[in-house]
Image (cartoon, rainbow, N blue to C red):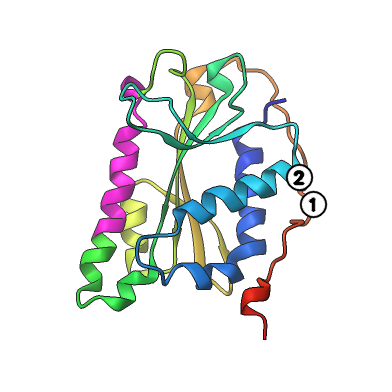
Amino acid sequence: MEIDYQTFESALKNWCELRYNEFKYYWPLNGGWEGWVQVDFAAYLQHNAPQVTLYREKKIYTDPKKRVDWLVNGDAPNPRKRIAVEIKCLSGGILNVKSPGTELKKFIAGIQKDQRKLKQENISMDNRGCQTVVIAINFAPEVQSSLEAAGLNCVTTAGDGEVQLWAQYIYTQMEVEPSFGASTSLGPFAPNPLSTSSSMFST
């Protein structure tokens, strides 16, 4: 079964609102924490919508060395129903360097690189026409204007605005096939079965 972009975004928002309190343990790490986001959301979606296929680190690009972070509806026979997603997470390692402004610029530059990466001409013929999305998890108010300038929209906030989930739906369902027909919506997602607090950090 395939889901539409709106259902995917809804699941992502619910996951973010459920798990944001965990982020503080990961974003201070130098080297990034996108890998954790990849795995944790994939597990969340698998539990709540096991009929939906989500691949991590899937080869969809003409450059065989590059992989997409997520390919939602990865088994859909029609590539136009697949949703290719690139992720960027601001790393709190910026707090440990002398020039945090430089690190913030790298965050925006990484998003822009992913936007270029997701251009249809860079996608292999068997996946060309897929919907494309860039998402970003941000906790630095000073880069909000840069995220907006890059074309992203804030889709949810959590933790009294401390955590922001941004997204840009680049190559949309309507662009690839205006008469797409009704897409499946899974409705509200159940609570994450995974613990929302790690015993490793329990008090």
**Where's the C terminus, which quadrant?**
bottom right
Task: Examine the rendering and report whether any part of residue 154 can be seen.
Answer: no
198 or 153: nearer the viewer = 198
Q: Amino acid at mark 2?
A: Asn
Question: Which amino acid type corresponds to the residue marked 1 in the rendered image?
Answer: Ala
* Separation (CA) of disc 1 from disc 2: 6 Å
Residue 33 shows up from this direction? yes
Foreground of the two, 9 or 96: 96
Q: Residue tagged by mark 1?
A: 190
- Look at 75% across and 31% down and name the residue there: 51
- Image-based side of 21 in relation to 122, left or right: right
Task: State the residue at coordinates (53%, 54%).
Answer: 37
Range of the magenta residues?
106-122
Who's the residue at 62% across and 45% down the image? Answer: 42
Q: Earlier in the sequence, mark 1 or mark 2?
A: 2
Give the percent coordinates (x, y) of residue 197.
Answer: 68, 71
Observer-nearest of 156 and 132: 132
Q: Is residue 141 above or below residue 81?
A: below
Which disc is residue 85 wearing?
A: none
List the residue tagged with mark 2. 48
Residue at image location 30% in from the left, 54% down from the top: 108
